[in-house]
Image (cartoon, rainbow, N blue to C red):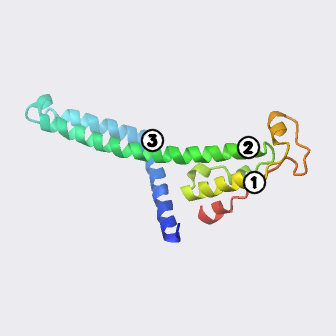
């Protein structure tokens, strides 16, 4: 991906993340309830009241459009968080001790390209021969790496 395209993708991902955070807040829920209450109160002033098809169509259309857009926003956020969580779990399975978690903490807040770069890097780390025993045991590892698989996510520093 070229730099301008990556920058635009990063900005879009960041905007979606901000919108999702806001829409999950108490403020947004309060605004939604207020809009519905104002719509309900407006029935008093509309000719035909509850039986006015145009007024009912207004709230139905608005909620349908909002729901349609929110499905894609929520799915995008869920995909990003799932990839980040999977990458973190993969790294933990590679080496249960000595993980450089500072590189992985907050990974779900990074742009998609960064998550994919870290994911590739985690998958490319050479696993110790006794990784299965290390995962099952509570004892510290005694291999040459000290049980550590350090993930260097240089893409976080350059893209994040």
Give the number of the disc on residue 125: 1
Q: Residue at x 56, y 52 (%)?
A: 109
Question: Neighbour class for label 1 at 10 Å: few (<14), some, many (≥20)?
Answer: some
Q: Residue at x 75, y 54 (%)?
A: 125
Q: Residue furthest left?
A: 47
Rendered location of residue 15, percent (x, y): 45, 55
Rendered location of residue 56, percent (x, y): 18, 35
Residue 47, above or below 15: above
Nearest to N terminus: mark 1 or mark 3: 3
Contact (Cβ within 8 Å) of mark 1 with mark 2:
no
Q: Nearer the viewer, residue 56 or 125?
A: 125
The part of the image, by quadrant, that contains residue 27 is top left
Give the secondary structure at mark 1. Answer: loop
Residue 39, above or below 15: above
Nearest to N terminus: mark 3 or mark 2: 3
Give the number of the disc on residue 25: 3
Give the secondary structure at mark 2. Answer: helix
Question: Neighbour class for label 3 at 10 Å: few (<14), some, many (≥20)?
Answer: few
Q: Nearer the viewer, residue 22 or 129?
A: 129
Contact (Cβ within 8 Å) of mark 3 with mark 2:
no
The part of the image, by quadrant, that contains residue 38 is top left
Cα–Cα span, label 1 and label 2: 12 Å
Which quadrant, please, contains the C terminus?
A: bottom right
Q: Nearer the viewer, residue 4 or 54?
A: 4
Q: Residue at x 72, y 47 (%)?
A: 91
Left or right? Give the position of 91 relative to 14.
right
Q: Nearer the viewer, mark 1 or mark 3?
A: 1
Cα–Cα span, label 1 and label 3: 39 Å
Cα–Cα span, label 3 and label 2: 31 Å
Q: Residue furthest top?
A: 50
Q: Residue at x 67, y 46 (%)?
A: 88
Mark 2, residue position? 92
């Amino acid at each position: 991906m070229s730099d301008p395209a990556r920058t635009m993708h990063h900005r879009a991902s960041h905007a979606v993340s901000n919108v999702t955070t806001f829409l999950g807040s108490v403020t947004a829920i309060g605004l939604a309830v207020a809009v519905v209450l104002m719509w309900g109160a407006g029935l008093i002033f509309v000719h035909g009241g509850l039986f006015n098809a145009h007024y009912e169509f207004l709230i139905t259309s608005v909620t349908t459009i909002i729901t349609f857009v929110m499905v894609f926003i929520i799915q995008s956020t869920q995909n990003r968080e799932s990839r980040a969580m999977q990458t973190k779990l993969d790294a933990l399975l590679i080496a249960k001790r000595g993980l450089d978690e500072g590189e992985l903490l907050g990974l779900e807040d990074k742009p998609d390209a960064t998550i994919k770069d870290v994911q590739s890097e985690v998958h490319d780390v050479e696993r110790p021969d006794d990784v299965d025993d290390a995962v099952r045991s509570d004892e510290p590892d005694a291999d040459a790496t000290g049980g550590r698989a350090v993930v260097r996510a240089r893409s976080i520093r350059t893209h994040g």
